Image (cartoon, grey):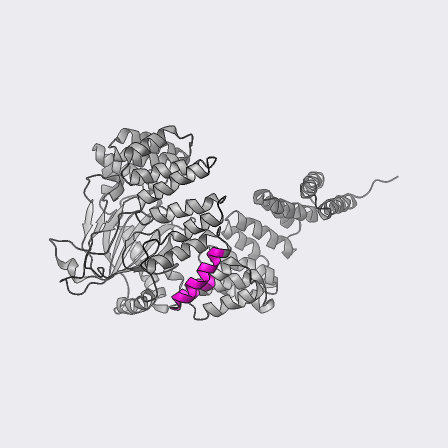
Amino acid sequence: MNSPAPSANAAAALLKVRMALHSGDLANARAQAEAARRAFPGDAPLADVAGDLAMKTGDPRSAEAHFAAACAVAPQVAEYAVNHAIALQQLDRHGEAIAVLARHEASGRKDARHASVRAMSERALGHPAASARWYDIALALEPSRPRALNGRARLALERGEADALARFDRALAVSPGDADLWLGKAQALEVAGDTAGARTIAEQIAAQAPGYLAGLTFLAGLRLAAGEADFTAPFREAAARAPQDATIAAAHIETLAGLDYAAEAAEIAAAARRRFPNEAHFALLEAIHAGSAGDDARAGDIFAGLADNSPLRYLHEARHALRGRDPEAVEMLLARVLAADPWNISAWALRGMAWRLAGDARADWLHGQPGLVQFCPLAGREGLIGDAIAALRRLHAGSAMPLGQSLRGGTQTRGILFHRIEPELAELHQAIRATLETYRDALPPLDDTHPLLRNRETPWQLLGSWSARLTGGESGAGDYHTAHIHPQGIISSALYLVVPDAAADTEARRGWLEVGRPPPDLRLDLEPLRVIQPREAHLALFPSTLYHGTTPFGAANSGAAERMTVAFDVVTSNEGQA
């Protein structure tokens, strides 16, 4: 008797897998699928169902391999490509996801699922216009598709589109229980100037979903903007409603620390250590913030007893050693961080401080070479700055001081500035990119051992962009940026659009940019490596491994007191968003 054909055997194996899945035994179904894949490696439907089961069991890496195999065997099947793209998205490989989908672009324009998945990856890669086009295709085909409605509403908010609020309402009509959509509506209301409406929704979200951290953070920001001293109360109230949720305490700590409330953050961490004895990271958080608050003995005792061997622990213990002016200990600790992540910007920033403290010549190599810090006139047409200022003032009128940023006073625009639809901002973006090439041309030579110069010849793009506006503070005490770094980039920046009159005083140096001064919590008496007097239409560019901040300036007796900048971080083109 003849044996069954291989295709029949594969079909029988697939049927067994589907029967196991239908019975609800997910683990058994996946085990059978994996065995069938080994027996029939060239069968596309088996590869696809094995990928689906891997996704359902939280294994996107295996799923991606299975879906890739299905696409290789049956490249004409568009559904396999969409499944493959979704797995790639789970692995944060959005460029590859788009490449997979592009092979079926013609048919994808007639498939709402394909279009929605493509839109998600375009958005993740920082291509908002392309993302909007694909979401619009998906919604034209399937107007009630929840993910497309959500993603398109988010894009409208991020890009400053006038119909953002209406888009959130349409999405909520389809998914009325989605907390993320309600938060989006609250954010859209705030942008539209209805802060009372925004707060009402935010308070309802916090009451009904106390573990939804994005909602708590937004509500805390509204309270901060309203001038409430106890702006982090939503976290405390949420913890009372959900006492077993350790993530609420972690977010509470982060929010306090982000605005220099280090001592308070340390106390919340200490209380969380007692409530959650099995959550070891709270000990690290207490050590971090106790040290920032000046309680070095307490921080040292906790660091000494930590069992945590993560790079994050060693990075913060290096900060603690730097406060103690022990550059040898700093170097030893940072070596452990850099062994795991050789180009960690935060580690290199601390290393630079330690080298300066020790008088090590490598400090000059890292930050002292001519051309690393530049102050360049902005490329662009006459009148561009004025047009950009007018557009940005409109945005700042509806903005607030953000949580967790360097700003101390004033306002900062929301989201990614250069993803917005205003033509003046698109033109400003292009002028900045042209100026970046001037900066590149004047850099020292390529150096594969240097955290910036190793990328001297690689393509660059922008990761994030925003505008900050300071007005000196109502009391005249002064607004400023505290010393900080942006650890996601390789180059940081400050483009001056409006400069306060006080900045003209070369003795007082009010509102000037200090590059290389240590942050206050390190308590080091090192002077800045460069002090830059602001000048309109000029762009300061420097390695992201350099701490930077501004001196305060106030309104009292100083004439016009407005300082408006645009800032961004530069990354290599395969690391971030445009």
Q: Is residue 236 magenta?
A: no
Near-viewer residue (568 or 209): 209
Q: Locate residue 228, reporting x and y percent.
A: 33, 57
Q: Quadrant of residue 478?
A: bottom left
Q: Does any portion of residue 225 appear in the rendered image?
A: yes
Q: Locate residue 366, reporting x and y percent.
A: 27, 40
| Residue found at the very far front of the displayed protein | 240
| Residue found at the very far right of the displayed protein | 1
Q: Main SS of the magenta segment? A: helix
Near-viewer residue (323 or 417): 323
Q: Is residue 201 magenta?
A: yes
Left or right: where does residue 191 sit relative to residue 10? left
Give, as a single range, the part of the protein colored magenta: 184-207
Q: Does any portion of residue 578 appear in the rendered image?
A: no
User: Image height check: is 556 above or below 284?
Assistant: below
| Residue found at the very far left of the displayed protein | 507
Q: Locate residue 160, reporting x and y percent.
A: 41, 66
Left or right: where does residue 394 sit relative to residue 81? left
What residue do we see at 55% from left, 60% from top?
A: 177
